[in-house]
Image (spheres, rainbow, N blue to C red):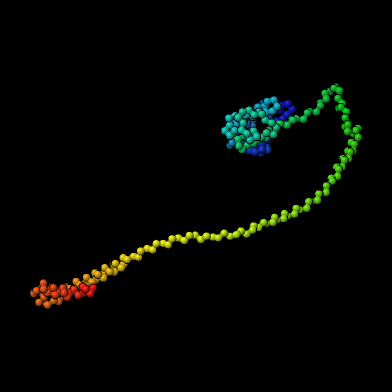
């Protein structure tokens, strides 16, 4: 208790929900060990977890090097932190307590024997009753009527532009078309006389072959007397062949 105020912790979550722990000493320790001022049997709570120290205006909470830490309004503290009414103190991650600071009512006046009684001060009537009812509010002026202007008549649509007259050109005299000059006649290619020469050569060759074949046939079929005088007989054979050559 400090300056007509009472402080307490109310467990919201933990092994003993809604249990109230009154804070009355200058120093209050909290932990899992039963030797603490507030013993909380929870695995997340260290043996010596948190300490609350009374200062001017309320308590200050500080962590005692616990494993899971001490939190004020979900923020992990690293040093002494002053508490305000309604703050949520978290011991580890599974235990939460609400810090409450309530003002105490003023004690009644106690009369000692022989002391004159003190009359209470006269009640002061409210000043509103003497003033009477408030005046009625003045009516608000009506807004001026809204005059809607008449719409202006729309201008007549523009007439479509008349098409300009098409000026036709006078027919021009057609110019005579001169035909292009005739191309010079192509030179006639000389006739190919190669086939004719080949045909003549073949005929001559056939004639020579026929003459040779005839001579060989005559020699082959000549009588034995022909070989007794071959030079004279050859002259006669040549005389027989010459008419054939003259025919060719």
Residue positioned most to the top = 114
Q: Is residue 28 visible?
A: no
Depth check: give the residue in front, 157 or 37.
Answer: 157
Q: Residue 38, position in %: x, y?
A: 64, 32
Residue 178 is left or right of residue 35, and the answer is: left
Task: Look at 58% across and 60% down and name the residue there.
Answer: 174
Task: Look at 9% across and 77% down and name the residue there.
Answer: 225
- Give the position of the N terminus as an image quadrant: top right
Residue 175 is left or right of residue 229, and the answer is: right
Q: Which quadrant would residue 146 be assigned to in this image?
A: top right
- Give the position of the C terminus as an image quadrant: bottom left
Task: Look at 60% across and 29% down and name the residue there.
Answer: 78
Task: Look at 81% across and 26% down and name the residue there.
Answer: 110
Depth check: give the residue in front, 158 or 133.
Answer: 158
Q: Residue 140, position in %: x, y?
A: 87, 40
Is the residue 163 above or below the residue 55 in the image? below
Report the number of discs.
0
Is the residue 161 above or below the residue 238 in the image? above
Depth check: give the residue in front, 122 or 196.
Answer: 196
Q: Which quadrant would residue 247 be assigned to in this image?
A: bottom left
Residue positioned most to the left = 228
Residue 102 is left or right of residue 197, and the answer is: right
Residue 189 is left or right of residue 115, and the answer is: left
Q: Residue 60, position in %: x, y?
A: 66, 28
Q: Which quadrant would residue 168 be assigned to in this image?
A: bottom right
């Amino acid at each position: 208790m400090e300056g007509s105020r009472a402080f307490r912790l109310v467990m919201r979550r933990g092994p003993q929900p809604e249990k109230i722990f009154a804070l009355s000493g200058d120093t209050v320790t909290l932990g899992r060990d039963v030797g603490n001022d507030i013993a909380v049997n929870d695995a997340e709570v260290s043996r010596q977890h948190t300490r609350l120290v009374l200062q001017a205006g309320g308590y200050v909470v500080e962590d005692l090097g616990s494993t899971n830490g001490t939190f004020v309004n979900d923020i992990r503290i690293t040093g002494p932190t002053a508490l305000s009414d309604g703050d949520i103190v978290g011991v580890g991650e599974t235990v939460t307590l609400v810090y409450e600071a309530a003002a105490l009512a003023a004690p009644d006046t106690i009369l000692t024997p022989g002391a004159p009684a003190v009359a209470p001060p006269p009640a002061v009537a409210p000043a509103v009753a003497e003033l009477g009812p408030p005046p009625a509010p003045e009516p608000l002026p009506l807004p001026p009527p809204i005059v809607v202007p008449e719409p202006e008549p729309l201008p007549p649509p523009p007439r479509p532009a008349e098409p300009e007259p098409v000026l036709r050109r006078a027919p021009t005299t057609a110019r005579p078309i001169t035909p292009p000059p005739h191309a010079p006649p192509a030179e006639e290619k000389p006739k190919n006389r190669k086939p004719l020469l080949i045909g003549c050569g073949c005929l001559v060759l056939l004639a020579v072959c026929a003459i040779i074949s005839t001579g060989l046939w005559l020699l082959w079929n000549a009588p034995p007397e022909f070989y007794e005088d071959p030079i004279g007989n050859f002259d006669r054979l040549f005389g027989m062949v010459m008419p054939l050559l003259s025919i060719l």
